[in-house]
Amino acid sequence: TRSRLLNLDAIPGGDVKLLSDVLNLPDTRVIIVAGGNDKIIPPTASRNVAERFSLRFVTLQGRGHDPFEENPEEFVNMIEALLQEQEIEC
């Protein structure tokens, strides 16, 4: 999204192509995380992408476009909890 906002368009084919390529990597798991108050990419758009690719979707309520920067501890705790659910070592 930042590349699009900065007109860098560094990913030929766009974000969906990038996500498709990442999902084709071996042993790769993807979780879509959205801020509930994201004004740049509405959470519904992120949810649609997650559903399109059958990915786990998590909304961090009260957060905006960069929830990992707004509250890093909350974000890390959420990721660690998700990894533990999947029995993946942190």
Image (cartoon, rainbow, N blue to C red):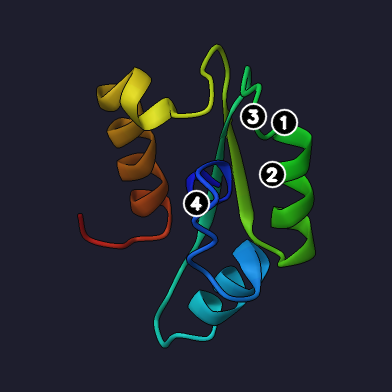
Q: Which mark is residue 40?
A: 3
> How far is the residue under mark 1 from the one under mark 4?
17 Å
Q: Quadrant of residue 58?
A: top right
Type of amino acid under label 4: Ser
Name the residue at 50% across, 62% down.
30
Type of amino acid under label 2: Ser
Disc number lying in front (1 or 4): 4
> How far is the residue under mark 1 from the one under mark 3?
6 Å
Q: Which mark is residue 24?
A: none
Which quadrant holds the C terminus? bottom left
Label 2 vs 4, first from the N-terminus: 4
Instruction: Indicate the secondary structure of the residue bearing disc 4.
Output: helix
Residue 36's x, y, as percent? 63, 22
Instruction: Indicate the secondary structure of the residue bearing disc 1.
Output: loop
Instruction: Indicate the secondary structure of the residue bearing disc 2.
Output: helix
Q: Which mark is residue 42?
A: 1
> How far is the residue under mark 2 from the one under mark 1?
7 Å
Disc number lying in front (2 or 4): 4
> How far is the residue under mark 3 from the one under mark 4?
13 Å
- Front-lying residue, 31 or 40: 40
Residue 2's x, y, as percent? 49, 44
Residue receiving disc 4: 3
Residue receiving disc 2: 46
> How far is the residue under mark 2 from the one under mark 4?
17 Å
Residue 25's x, y, as percent? 45, 85
Type of amino acid under label 3: Ile
Disc number lying in front (1 or 3): 3
Question: Circles 1 and 4: CB distance less than 8 Å?
Answer: no
Disc number lying in front (2 or 3): 3
Question: Circles 2 and 1: CB distance less than 8 Å?
Answer: yes
Type of amino acid under label 1: Pro
